[in-house]
Image: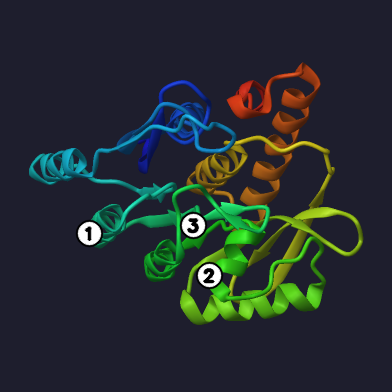
């Protein structure tokens, strides 16, 4: 029987991010996927001055009640971009309802800064939410924000150990730190499984695209649900995400439009 996942994210009407990535990627990994579109955006928030967002939290509460009445069940829940206290609270209610794997991508910011429209309250909400998670996938900005650690362009292994120790005080989840720039000059995804730390280095490409984190987290969850352990799932997700970033860069695609996931779908097949 197929595994079933529920994705709590925003839906962007034009650019490629969030549900536009999670749904096709998880389905391609043979995961039957349901969605709760907590916000409707015209575009993703990175790079656009004319920013539109519509909160759909109340509508999603009604959908969630319908899910419960129909006795729907899930093998995993994946939460990404959450924009208000009410959305965080709804996510917590949903996490408490289902006994399943919970992956939280603690979307807060990048490049050492909070995303547009976020403030300190979002950090506090997220620190509370990750307590419920089995897996978290913060980038280094988000790792520093939730641990109150100074953000650096380059991190040492000692920095990483301190950050992981602080995260372990907040949550008992498996931790996957993404796109870590190390002193060696390499980028890496770093996995902590409560026992050991493993570094997965990958090719550094001088480009970044909105939606890359959504792609990585979706691939990671899909592989994990298909029986790979957290180290194997992280490695496979990292390789495919890097391939997509490279493909998007070489294609000349405008950065603001988000990552092109075609190489991920081809790689899954």
Image check: 61 left or right of 182? left
Q: Can residue 189 be seen?
A: yes
Residue to which mark 2 is pinned: 146
The residue at the point 59 percent across, 44 percent down is 213
As measured in the structure, the alpha-carbon distance from the residue carrying label 3 to the one carrying label 2 is: 9 Å
Q: Is residue 88 left or right of residue 194?
A: left
The image quadrant of residue 113 is bottom right
* Residue 159, label in figure: none
Closer to the chain start, of discs 3 and 1, is 1
Mark 3 residue crowding within 10 angstroms, few (<14) / some (14–19) / many (20+): many
- Measured Cα–Cα span from mark 2 to mark 1: 21 Å
Residue to which mark 3 is pinned: 106
Query: Looking at the figure, which quarter contains the N terminus?
Result: top left
Q: In the displayed orientation, state which residue is furthest to the front.
A: 49
* Callout 3: SS: loop
Residue 93's disc is: 1
Q: Residue at x 29, y 52 (%)?
A: 87
Q: Disc 2 on helix, strand or loop?
A: helix
| Disc 1 element | helix
């Amino acid at each position: 029987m197929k595994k079933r996942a529920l994705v709590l994210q925003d839906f962007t009407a034009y650019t490629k991010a969030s549900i536009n990535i999670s749904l096709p990627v998880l389905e391609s990994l043979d995961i039957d996927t349901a969605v709760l579109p907590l916000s409707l955006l015209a575009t993703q928030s990175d790079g656009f001055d004319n920013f539109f967002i519509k909160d759909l939290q109340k509508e999603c509460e009604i959908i969630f009640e319908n899910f419960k009445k129909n006795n729907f069940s899930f093998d995993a829940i994946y939460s990404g971009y959450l924009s208000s206290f009410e959305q965080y609270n709804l996510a917590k209610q949903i996490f408490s309802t289902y006994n399943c794997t919970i992956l939280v991508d603690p979307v807060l910011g990048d490049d050492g800064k909070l995303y547009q429209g976020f403030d300190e309250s979002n950090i506090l909400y997220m620190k509370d939410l990750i307590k419920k998670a089995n897996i978290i996938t913060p980038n280094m900005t988000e790792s520093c924000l939730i641990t109150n650690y100074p953000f650096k362009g380059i991190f040492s292994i000692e920095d990483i150990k301190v950050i992981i120790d602080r995260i372990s005080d907040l949550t008992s989840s498996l931790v996957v730190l993404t796109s870590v720039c190390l002193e060696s000059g390499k980028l890496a995804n770093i996995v902590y499984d409560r026992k050991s730390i493993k570094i997965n280095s990958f090719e550094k490409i001088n480009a970044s695209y909105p939606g890359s984190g959504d792609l990585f987290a979706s691939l990671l969850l899909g592989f994990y649900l298909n029986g790979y352990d957290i180290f194997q799932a992280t490695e496979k997700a990292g390789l495919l995400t890097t391939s997509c970033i490279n493909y998007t860069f070489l294609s000349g695609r405008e950065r603001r439009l988000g990552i092109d996931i075609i190489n991920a779908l081809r790689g899954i097949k």
